[in-house]
Image (cartoon, rainbow, N blue to C red):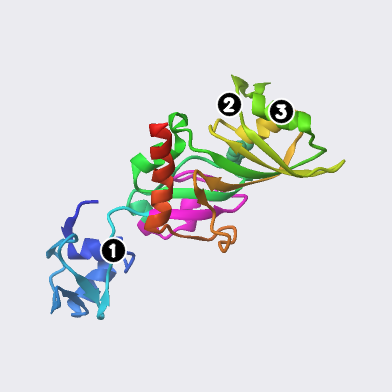
Amino acid sequence: MKDVMRLDKLLAALGEGTRTQVRDIIRAGRVAVDGMPERDAGRQIDTAKQSVTLDGRPLVYKSVRHVMMNKPGGVLTAARDKKQKTVMDLLPPLYAAMGCMPAGRLDKDTEGLLIITSDGQLAHRIISPRHDVGKVYFARVDGPLTGEDVSAFAAGLHIDDADGEFDARPAILDIVRSGENESEARVRVTEGRYHQVKRMFAARGRRVTYLKREKIGALALDSSLAPGEWREMTDEEVSLLEQEDREEENA
Ligand code: URA
């Protein structure tokens, strides 16, 4: 979105109501620009320079938005879908209106850290394998895990299944608990192919029964976010994502 826009469009973009509702609010004299009441809905506002209040409350306009979500199971990672609920349906319409999109995909049944951003460059950095951003997943599988699995993940698994064939990059497998019928582990991968983690375990004869993304680069999921909850990212969190990229670009 541009920095200069009509007052009614600005209020609507900030989620203060529909265009009709915000025009009524403006006509009622509840909005002030640089401290002076403004009743003209068409007034052009430079959001970088002018301050706008509603009932005395400052409205903070950001041209870029970054959201951290704990994606719940059962929801598609997509901008929209005719039939199924998507992660964008969990956010107020403001975010879609500002061009926010999920940065990468988690399967419908996968939970955990998902970044939704209006910054295409940031999204590209997260997704592109060229940038090598590590992603850490917690996985539960249907049988034991051993040191041989750790070595096989580290060597780089050869995947050859119904979805195709590829050599996975070396990955770190950290076994949390191994049991005859069920095991838990953390996996760090640096690529995000279709069903990547599930296919890697399948290549070792294990089926993933639960998968959650815990980290992207140096950014960890806020543990206070329950599945389906989200919040805007802090500047520090955004710079964590940029930081790791810079280190790797210099490497
Ligand atoms: N790997 C998978 O198999 N599924 C995901 O959702 C993410 C990584």
In the image, residue 142 sits, relative to residue 236, either above or below, namely above
Earlier along the polypeptide chain: callout 1 or callout 3?
A: 1
C-beta proximity under 8 Å, tags 1 and 3: no
Dot 3 crowding, Cα within 10 Å, few <14, some 14–19, many 20+: some
Frontmost residue, 81 versus 106:
106
Foreground: disc 2 or disc 3:
3
From the image, tell me which residue sits under label 3. 151
Foreground: disc 1 or disc 3:
3
| Residue ID at (53%, 38%) | 134
Check the picture and name the quadrant holding the C terminus.
top left
From the image, tell me which residue sits under label 1. 12
Label 3 is placed on what type of residue?
A: Ser
Provide residue 42's location: percent of width, then percent of height. 13, 64
Dot 2 crowding, Cα within 10 Å, few <14, some 14–19, many 20+: some
Q: Secondary structure at mark 3?
A: helix
The image quarter in which residue 235 lies:
bottom left
Dot 1 crowding, Cα within 10 Å, few <14, some 14–19, many 20+: some
For marks 2 and 3, give the CA distance.
13 Å
From the image, tell me which residue sits under label 2. 169
Residue 152: in sight, yes or no? yes
| Residue ID at (17%, 58%) | 5
Earlier along the polypeptide chain: callout 2 or callout 3?
A: 3
For the image, the number of numbered tags is: 3
In the image, residue 135 sits, relative to residue 3, either above or below, namely above
Earlier along the polypeptide chain: callout 1 or callout 2?
A: 1
| Residue ID at (87%, 41%) | 180
Does 81 appear in magenta?
Answer: yes
C-beta proximity under 8 Å, tags 2 and 3: no
Provide residue 138's location: percent of width, then percent of height. 66, 46
For marks 1 and 3, give the CA distance.
54 Å
Q: Secondary structure at mark 2?
A: loop
